[in-house]
Amino acid sequence: MGPFPHIMIEQTSYPTVIVGGDRFTGLFGKPRHAHLEHVITTPAYISHIFEACYKFGFRGFDVSMSEQVIRCFRQLKEKYPDCIGIGNPNWNCGIMLDAIPLRKAAPRIKAYLFTQVFSADEQAAIAQLSPEQQAGWFAYPAKAIPLTDHDIARITVDEQAYQANLDRLKPLCEFCLVGTVFADWLPLLGREDILRTLIQRIRASGMIPLSIHHWTSLVLPRLDTLDVAGHWTYLNKAWQFLAEQDALHAIRHASKPVTAFSVLRSRDPEALEAYFDYAFQVARVDAVDFGVETIEEAQRISTILHARYAGTERQTYME
């Protein structure tokens, strides 16, 4: 099958269909297919999937900090130079509170946001989320002590640690993601300066920065003011943060191209068309990122997208 359409972002070709890399890291739970538990992170299997994805028309690949993923994508790109890498350097990236990784302060951050930042409407929207969503993203122990303004002022980034991650990705990746949970938290804590520092590092490394975040309606409008060329935002009708219509409004009014990820979360095999229709037709995103675990999944998704979107015109975003 031929490649899917690309758009131009800052004079650089950007794929509208991107293969996610998280499933091959082993960091995000067990695979959906139990028989893959001990093989999905192996170089042989990752290369097997990457090669198949290329043949099915996929040219964009999300490249995490996993050594196996980096190695396999390097081999793929050497064989097929038209592959485009979107690097994700945000694991162990040096964002700290004192000498502790900021991720470990998540309960205190959430306690601060609930007591100092979230409006009554936002708290009500969170209360309407499923218990699983609340537990994973917003719940915190009752004994958690909220951050103080002094704590927030002491959040720092180890630029050398971050640069070390960038140095591993820059030979392979044209684009680079900045944020993940840090792009959810830092704007709401008033510390966009840290994101600006990371963005400057990405640009100095020769890659084009794209924000990545989960709390679409809360942070996408804020991130749209930064020197990023586009955004990756969480989009899933059954799992959206916070209110669905607010998230759709933020996506549609972003001034830069938006890529949706987690589009297929909680997937129903019979509803893949509906998931992609929601992303492209309802939310009107510019691109999608999704995970695959088997060749059969990749082929089916490719068939669906070729049938529905391969000829769809996309806007060009230039500086």
Image (tube, helix red, strand yellow):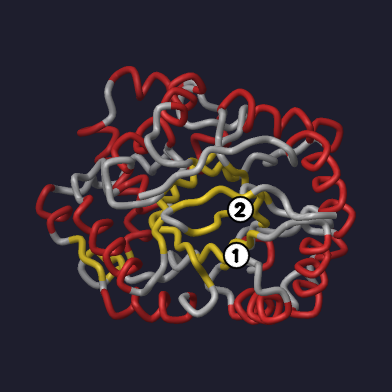
Circle 2 sits on which residue? 15
In the drawing, does residue 144 fall left or right of residue 3?
left
On residue 221, the disc is none
Apparent side of residue 100 relative to residue 302 in the rendered image (left or right): left
The residue that appears at 49% across and 47% down in the rendered structure is 232
- Helix, strand or loop status at disc 2: strand
Packing grade of label 1 (10 A; few <14, some 14-19, many >=20) is: many
Residue 74 position within the rendered picture, expressed as x and y whole percent measured from the top left: 63, 80
* Residue 35 position in % (x across, y down): 87, 63
Nearest to the observer: residue 94 or residue 222? 222
Numbered tag placed on residue 84 in the rendering: 1
Task: Please report whichever mark, 1 or 2, sits nearer to the chain's N-terminal start.
Answer: 2
Whole-percent x and y of residue 119? 27, 23
**299 displayed left or right of 22:** right
What's under tag 1, amino acid-wise? Ile
Quarter location, residue 200:
bottom left
x and y percentages locating residue 283 in the rendered image: 56, 27
| Residue 67 sits above or below residue 25 on the image | below
Circles 1 and 2 in contact, beta carbons < 8 Å: yes
Find residue 114 and report its image quarter: top left
